[in-house]
Amino acid sequence: MNAKSLAVAAGLAMLASSASAALVTNGGFEDVSGLADGGKNRGSYGVYNSIPGWTKSSGSGIELQDNGTLGTIDANTGNWYVELDSDENSSMYQDVTFASAGDYVLSFFYAPRTSTIGDNGITYSVAGALSGFVDDVFPAGWREVKSVFTVASAGTLRLTFTAGGLSNSLGGFIDDVSIAPVPVPAAGLMLMGGLAGLGAFARRRRQA
């Protein structure tokens, strides 16, 4: 394999490794370790000030529901998902560490609970880098929300989700939250390979 091919292969391997790195802890809400009754403390669901990876920042708490809670919706994947309008509109956060500056993509799955317009809104943000809002009405079901944002430098930024609809104990659902680096386009990989090839050629000329 020549130097250019090796460089491209190495670039692809590095990108695959970085893209698979888990920046968000317990983004699927499947870790309920240490919570009352394995994630339920109100008979069929639970409301907590904190769950693994996440902390309440306002309102009554983080409401964990599982596939048997409502009967009208299951988790997007697995068994657990979150509702933030628990007793009243609430918010939760997680501090995410970014190893380097660059472009990242926030992805999560959202579903509405009620058929009332304006009742199921969720706001989301990465402090200083991203803010957004999603809303819909039942029975729309789960859909993926993706937003690209830029991190100016390595460090820690706060990821926050907040119920943004009517404060009536019924609101939107969240599942499968993730943040990943935006992959370098194929053209960028080819440029990396070309530069590596030029470097190898230059070294051979110096050694001749």
Image: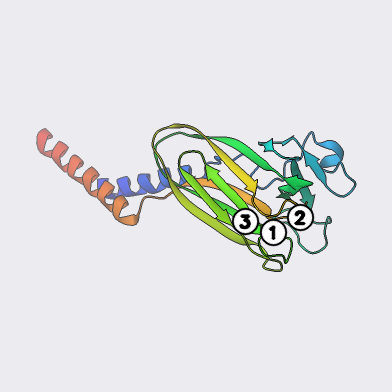
Q: Residues within 10 Å of mark 3 (few under 14, many from 20)?
A: many
Identify the amino acid type marked 3. Phe
- Report whether 53 appears left or right of 149: right
- How far, Cα to Cα, is label 3 from label 1? 17 Å
- Report whether 143 appears left or right of 67: left
Instruction: Establish if 135 lies above or below 139.
Output: above
Residue at image point 87% right, 40% down: 37
Q: Which residue is mark 3?
A: 109
Identify the amino acid type marked 2. Leu
Colour scheme of this structure image? rainbow
Whether pointer 1 and pointer 2 mark residues with C-beta atoms closer than 8 Å, the reply is yes
Q: Quadrant of the C terminus?
A: top left
Task: Identify which residue, 4 or 34, lies in the foreground.
Answer: 34
Residue ranking furthest to the right: 43
- Asked whether residue 16 appears in the rendered view, the answer is yes
Q: Which corner quadrant of the image does residue 203 belong to?
A: top left
Regarding mark 1 in the picture, which secondary structure is present there?
A: loop
Of callouts 3 and 1, the N-terminal one? 3
Instruction: Establish if 5 lies above or below 24.
Output: below
State the image coordinates of residue 27 (x, y, percent, origin top left): 63, 45
Task: Identify which residue, 4 or 158, lies in the foreground.
Answer: 158
Regarding mark 3 in the picture, which secondary structure is present there?
A: strand
Q: Which residue is mark 2?
A: 170
Of callouts 3 and 2, the N-terminal one? 3
Q: Which corner quadrant of the image does residue 137 belong to?
A: bottom right
Point out which mark residue 62 bears.
none
Residue at image point 79% right, 42% down: 47
Residue at image point 71% right, 65% down: 116
- Report whether 37 appears left or right of 104: right
State the image coordinates of residue 120 (x, y, percent, origin top left): 68, 58
